[in-house]
Amino acid sequence: MYRPALALRASALALAVTLALPGCSGLLRSQFAETPPPATIELAGLDAAVSVRRDTLGIPLIDAASLDDLVYAQGFVAAEDRFAQMIGFKLIAQGRLAEMVGEPVLDIDRYMRTLNLRRSAEILLANASPEGRRLLERYAAGVNAWLKARPLPPDLKLAGYQPEPWTPLDSMSVFALINFGLAQNLQEEVGFLRLAQQVGWEKAAWLAPSYRDEPLPFDEAAKLKGLDLATLNPAIDKLLLAQAALDKVTNQGIAASNNWAIAPVRTARGASIVANDTHLPLSQPAMWHYVHARAPGFDVAGVAAAGLPGVVAGFNGKLAWGMTMVMADNQDVFLEQIKQIDGKPHYLYQGQWLPCTARTERYRMKGGKAVDETVYETRHGPLLNGVLSRPPMHDLLAREVRSGYGIAIQSAAFEADKSLDAFFALNRAQSVAEAQPILRQVRAIELNMVFGDREHIGWQVTGRYPLRAKGRGQLPSPGWNGEYEWQGYLDADKHPASLDPAAGFIATANHRTVGADYPYHLTSSWYYPERSERATELLAASRQHSAASSERMQLDRHSRLADKFRDWLGAHRATVDAAIAKLDAAARPAAEQALARLLAFDGEMSPQSADAAIYGAFLHSLALDTFGDELGGPDSGAWAAFVRLNDASYGAIDDHLLGREDSPFWDDIRTPARETKADIIARALADAIGLLKARLGHDAGQWAWGKLHTYEWETDGKKLAPYLGAFDRFGLWLVDDILNRGPYPAGGDHSTLNVAAYPVGVDFHTWLVPAMRIIVDFGRDEPMQVINAGGQSSHPGSPHYADGIDWWLDGRYQPMPFKQVNIDAQYRERIELKPAGK
């Protein structure tokens, strides 16, 4: 899911730029030593003393005498644990990363300034309630108190970056960045343009399915009929590359997460259970920061985003809640006809040439250099072409781009609401009945919120969904005829919701959650259905659910997609056998071997499974053998767009795996024969065995999924290394074992509840995992248990930088107790924050 998807680690990138000094490994390592906080810290701005205790994983428990002091202390503690991460969030959201890193990231700043998240943050802040603004101010005061009292993290010091004071607008910028990360249609629509350039709009529609039971989007694709898309070719390739780089540091458009709520009638103890695991790119440090915060009338525990007060998913002793991504379609790409009139850009709209609006952005770079550039907008939003028209600072973008169309992005990000206030209110809500109307006020962020108290469970869709005059907005629209305009948003009272359903449970997993008769359009970008199907299967199988059964579900690696394909092979065995018989004699035994193993495969994607390795290698080979000929293979821009679309939502690889026998992509255009689906599957079966022999050796007894498919906890600096120069890459190499962890054997894939997605058709490197796990069983003495996908701290010298990794790998959970006797037993390490001069 949760796209807050957005775990920026810009400090690691700064390291790459500033620390690449040959022979300085020992010196660099010494810079990462942590300075532990003193037992007592005096801080100006506190009204009374605040206690901060930590458990064995470094999870903080904050006790304050007032809500104002509590939020102040949360800001202090967040900065202690994650200040480098907070600065990264802020700078990327505001398009200011070059101020710390320098010119190599200027193109990312251009992209973010063009999208104008700062304006979104300003709108959100201006519309916050007086209490909301006060709490943001108190949080900022706590962060700034930390800045005065504690040393900067080593990566910021070594980068020579002196941060400015934290402000409420910085927190709202983080919130806007998280919201932006949950919207992915920009990337999907730009990717579709690239595919349409490659194979034509009609054939490209086969590559943008919704679900197997829904028609392919030929009607949406037909909006491009007659347009000369070739004029977009350079711009689209470079825009895709810019988006790929941005993905590395923002996790934009990440689709995943599971949550479920189980009613008392289906639990062993007769009380509700709520569980959530949000899926985000695997990164170091972790995205989420656990906290337990207590003040009179306020007691909440769960995950927070560094830079924001409160808890976004968790438990307050009475109510538990968790979230997944709706996959909302609230971004539309419009193609604009552009021409210069009197030296200024104009765009065509309903027969008139209208002047583009303009704003000037000043970019400041490390070292003092500054440059002013103009961003142009149409009625539909900012033109992304300007991002691509500057001389690049690195190889991400071309040196010159000429485009026959403007590429404008319309977004729901610039509407006023009180979403952050609603999250504050949710932290204090005491029941399902109280929570649901609060959740309807969350409009800035599109989520499936599942929630429960001891007796009741509920589901509420949040967000803002455009009402369009024509079309669904699934694929790009012409902007000049006015036919595809937005006409407001769906009223929140009409959003999908449920209370205490007859089934006795609710589960969401980014799948299609509404029936075909739902009269409004939420999205066409649902994620693959198999995770939801597996969750429903397990939940419906018992009326004795417990925290332990939810643990098993969160750790489950059974692939229903593999089951479905095994059944497909069984039903089409004769046809596949005949296709294998047509293969070259050298390939036939390999295809027969793979077929026999897949027909017997139990669907368990465990790291030790050889059959899972064969299945994974087959999917990889099937993608290349089916689509590689038309799309130009792994090194083409069209292939990159195709892989991104398949990563983002339900895609053509799985769609073709189980159906689409009439698809034009089954024919290999490089051969004179006309191949069938069975022919391509036979070829992929043989190629899968060849891949495994090349990667893992000829002894099939030594094959294992976890040898091919691995986890690596990497900083964003390492992820961006391919875009950096050799000198900078050397600097990262010097501290690789300090900053990064792994590889470890991985199980699962994109279709398993315990997700471990990898870019099918590229490699087997896991990029998406459960970034946290929460289970609240109201029938237990202490209902809540959690684990993070990494450590609490972003400081590489901290003992809590990576100590959660082994727990996460082993499937262990840490309780977050609410009873004082259990709190005193668990939280030992303690510091006291005292008012200065008192």
Image (cartoon, rainbow, N blue to C red):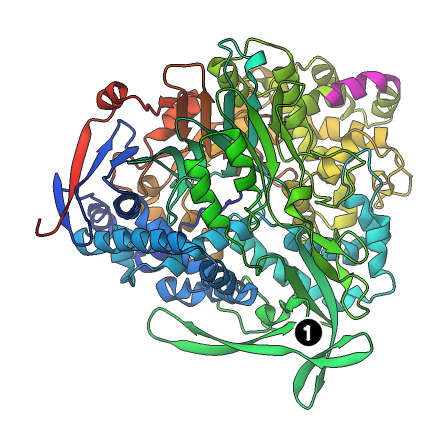
Determine if the magenta segment contains residue 142.
Answer: no
Mark 1 Cα-neighbour bin, 10 Å: few <14, some 14–19, many ≥20? few
402 is higher (above) or lower (below) than 112? below
Q: Position of residue 361 (x, y in %)?
A: 49, 74
Q: Amino acid at mark 1?
A: Arg
Residue 71 in the image, given as x and y percentages of width and height: 31, 46
| Residue at numbered disc 1 | 402
Q: Residue furthest left?
A: 837
In this orientation, which residue lies closer to the viewer: 328 or 476? Answer: 328
Please name the residue shown 22% across and 54% down the image. 145
| Quarter-of-image position of residue 167 | bottom left
Residue pictured at 52% horizontal, 23% vertical? 554
Q: Secondary structure at mark 1?
A: loop
Q: Which residues are magenta?
A: 564-574
Q: Is residue 572 magenta?
A: yes
Q: Is residue 727 visible?
A: no
